[in-house]
Amino acid sequence: MAESFGSPSPMQPLSVGNVVSAAVRLYRSHLKTYLKLALIAHLWALVPIYGWAKYAAISGLISRLAFGELVSQPESVKAARSHVNPRLWSFLRVAFQVALYLLLIYIGLVIAGGILAAVIGFVFGAILGSAGVIIATTLSIIIVVIIVLLGLTWFYARWAVAEVPLAVEENINGGESIDRSWELTKTSVIRIQGVVLVAFFVTLPIVLLLNYVPSLFLVRLEPGSTIYWIVYSISLVTSLIGGIFVMPFWQALKAVLYFDLRSRREGLGLQLREPPTQDFR
């Protein structure tokens, strides 16, 4: 039995709230499976290169499993893994390439913002003197932050589902998967930014509690002391736990976004299956 999200037409996109709520439902209905995969992925992430590739591939695996639920074609983990594992290094390429792109864009935005801030500072300084310097400094900081945040989130939205086509579609490589994300998202950037913002706030309590709060205790401790290393080790463990809980949600979210973007172009239909009473995997 399928449950509609209330969309009157298969070609109408899901709302920001529906995308996030669908991801939450997928996450909750397959919590055991997704958390187990996330745990394995994070343990692999401790191993350089090959482990990073495994982490990227398992991330894609979770998205594939979630997408299968959305199109009413659920797979076992074993079946989904047989599709994902042969593309192990392609998943690493996607992760590395997108991260490199975002890093270069970040550097470019900082430089552009810095140039604009310098021009503003010169103008205000010339007009208002020393008082203008203070105003210009404040404005410059605000402008640089706005430019960097808006620019990064715009480009992140374009590559938000970069690994999902690789996990789901046949006869596609890493570079083509990134291009596919760019093509699918070209008319939905603002909506995707909204989805990411809402999802960020949904996961924020977990991130703050497990990733950041433990690190605050390190501030007052003497670096190198026994108690420092004990607290540091605890903070690493809690950060790992936080990542394990958050990662599957984001991968399910990407699957819903990908499903939604494709549905408008290819008529997949905006239907989400009722979650099973028990995970069959």
Image: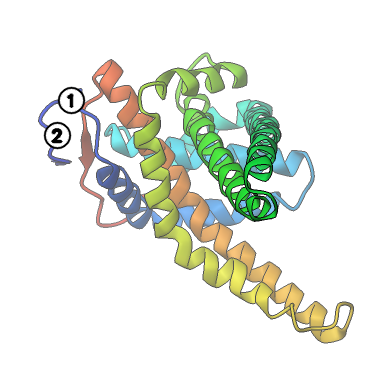
Residue 128's tag is none
- The one nearer the camera, 177 or 55, is 177
Residue at 77% across, 81% down: 230
Check the picture and name the quadrant holding the N terminus: top left
- The one nearer the camera, 108 or 93, is 108
Amino acid type of disc 1?
Pro
Above/below status of 267 relative to 24: above
State the count of labels.
2
Q: Do the CB atoms of the residues marked 1 and 2 lie less than 8 Å apart?
A: yes
* Left or right side of 259 for 39: right
- The one nearer the camera, 27 or 199, is 199
Above/below status of 242 relative to 165: below
Local SS, label 1: loop
**Residue 67: image location, x then y, percent:** 37, 35
Query: In the rendered image, is residue 165 in sight?
Result: yes
Q: Which residue is mark 2?
A: 7
Disc 2 crowd rating (10 Å Cα; few below 14, some 14-19, many 20+) is some
**Residue 50: image location, x then y, percent:** 75, 39
Residue at 56% across, 37% down: 152
Amino acid type of disc 2?
Ser
Q: Which residue is mark 1?
A: 10
Q: Residue furthest right?
A: 224
**Residue 128: image location, x then y, percent:** 63, 48
**Residue 156: image location, x then y, percent:** 52, 35
Q: Residue furthest top?
A: 171
